Image (cartoon, helix red, strand yellow):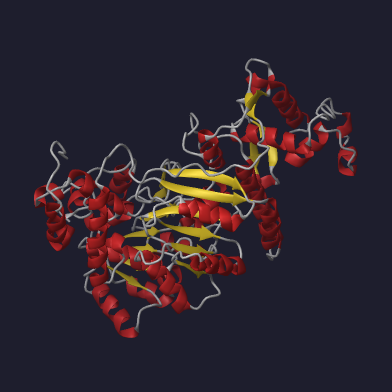
Amino acid sequence: MPGTPLETLRTVFGYHAFRPHQEEIIAGVIRGEDSFVLMPTGGGKSLCYQIPALHRPGVALVVSPLISLMKDQVDALQANGVRAEFYNSSLAEREAQRVLARLHQGDLDLLYVAPERLMGESFLERLKDIPISLFAIDEAHCVSQWGHDFRPDYVQLGRLRELFPRVPLLALTATADSQTRTDIIRRLGLTQATCHVTGFDRPNIRYTVVDKQKPFNQLLAFLAGRPPEDAGIVYALSRKRVEEVAGRLVAAGIAAAPYHAGLGDGERSRVQEAFQRDELRVVVATVAFGMGIDKPNVRFVVHYDIPKNIESYYQETGRAGRDGLPAEALLLFGYGDIVVARGLIENGGNPEQNRIELQKLNAMVGFAEAVTCRRRVLLGYFSESLGEDCGNCDVCLDPPERFDATEEAQKALSCVYRVGQRFGMGHVIDVLRGSRSQRLLQLGHDRLSTYGIGRELSSEVWGGVLRQLVHLGYLEQDLASYGVLKLTAAARPLLRGEERLHLARPREKPVTPVKPPRRAAGNIAYDEGLFQSLRSLRKELADTAGVPPFVIFGDATLIEMAAFRPTDAESLLRINGVGNHKLGRYGGAFLEVLRGYGGAMPGRER
């Protein structure tokens, strides 16, 4: 494709500037370099291989784990005039032959394919005669047993580097802690790859944790406080709970449906398609309804039960607000759910994997119990620090009481040091409280100077202190080694008495959700009536074309239209998300609505 990557971004995809790190990643891939890309959901990972695919000769092979996700990506690319197809088991024989014919004729820029289909010997043989521009492995954490969604089919992708040594290879993920990142790079042979870790923060998502009491009533109250067109996902741990909650929502007059692996393929497809097409407001789902969602205008995600790990929580909440507009993540937290989650983990067959997963569950509980900025806790788990509290979580918006905890922190840190930085939180608390457990006595830890110096505080209080010290960076918790606590460099001045530390007191009463955020990001003002008219037009056009509404234009694009009210093709092209192909295909219809609504507002230049 002629021109620069920036020109492609503007003319094909309709965006006027790259997001952070996109431009350098794209430039490296165009030069033929391997890349490992860790970028949050909604951060623009897809463009990192879609634009290079339009600038390098040959076809880009994109590995994707779910059929529905492939279809959404291809629909969106085709709507922008890009030559893209998918090749998977959902295609009838005649359609599959058509796609393969386009592949052999050099008539494709991108082909999405499942890992097992790509790595089949017959398909690999077919690729020997086809120019390949790049391989992109999406959801690359699936290749790692440390990852939260390990898939054996992904492991064989490690052969690609050896089979196609001259073709650039990208691995992309939104959720990977340090162990998982290292494992991905090793398994895919990306030791020479440029690593781009752009950060995990999703500032447009508001994180809220509420004590679970009457969960269905809490869910209804949450939904009642949101605009009726806002769509979202409710996650639950069991199929039975999914069916129950979905049925009660329908009985309450809310357009909802269940989704889990126990349903037939046809019913799962129907639910997903109805949700994508804005015909369902709520999908109640197990984790089976995770990565397959490419819908950018999910406005909320509710966890009816606690997830089994922070990676799953981060990825599932990341389904909300992918368009960059404000969204909400609500977690209903009850201690009974921990028992259920632990039971699901312990029923697994691999003891070592079970141990890892139980450590990850403990970290998830620590997040739910946190009384410090939730975003700092979340980012800290992925080894990313936030310089100040986020101002957009329940703890920041309704702060708990704080107290001078310098002495308690010094006792806790000193105890971690005295036990040799080789034990987890439970053992440290036992030493502080003077436990007479057999294990503690056998180790001789009753003779330590820190033994019993914290008897006056409960285990719960000490647990809160230690978790906050982890969240604030004074301690680190090694999940690969039974949750062992270790001091960081930040602990030294605190231990020496060179600084004082204030921590949050645990809350004694339930927290209720704060008022939901406005739809529009930033200070952009727009006409709500015009926005709804544009949404109605988008739905009509989408139904006619047989695609989800967001494939036509996303909510963020419609909001810009409703704010700046373009009245001609030139000004419509200045709206983010409007490229040349979509202007030609849909521009006339949207301009007709925009002009008929009263023309441009004075002084609203783009």
**Residue 192 seen from this side:** no
Task: Report x, y in % for residue 322.
Answer: 38, 51
**Residue shown at 26% from the left, 40% from the top:** 525
In front of the other: 305 or 449: 305
How many discs appear?
0
Q: Which residue extends farthest bottom?
A: 94
In front of the other: 235 or 476: 235
Task: Report x, y in % for residue 4.
Answer: 18, 47
Task: Report x, y in % for residue 436.
Answer: 90, 38
Is 498 positioned to the left or the right of 411 in the image?
left
Q: Which residue extends farthest top?
A: 498
458 up-or-down from 246: above or below: above
**Residue shown at 47% from the left, 64% from the top:** 283
**Residue 427 seen from this side:** yes
**Residue shown at 37% from the left, 57% from the top:** 229
- Quadrant including the C terminus: top left
In front of the other: 2 or 331: 331
Residue 440 occupies quadrant: top right
Task: Report x, y in % for residue 159.
Answer: 46, 63
- Quadrant including the N terminus: bottom left
In front of the other: 587 or 111: 587
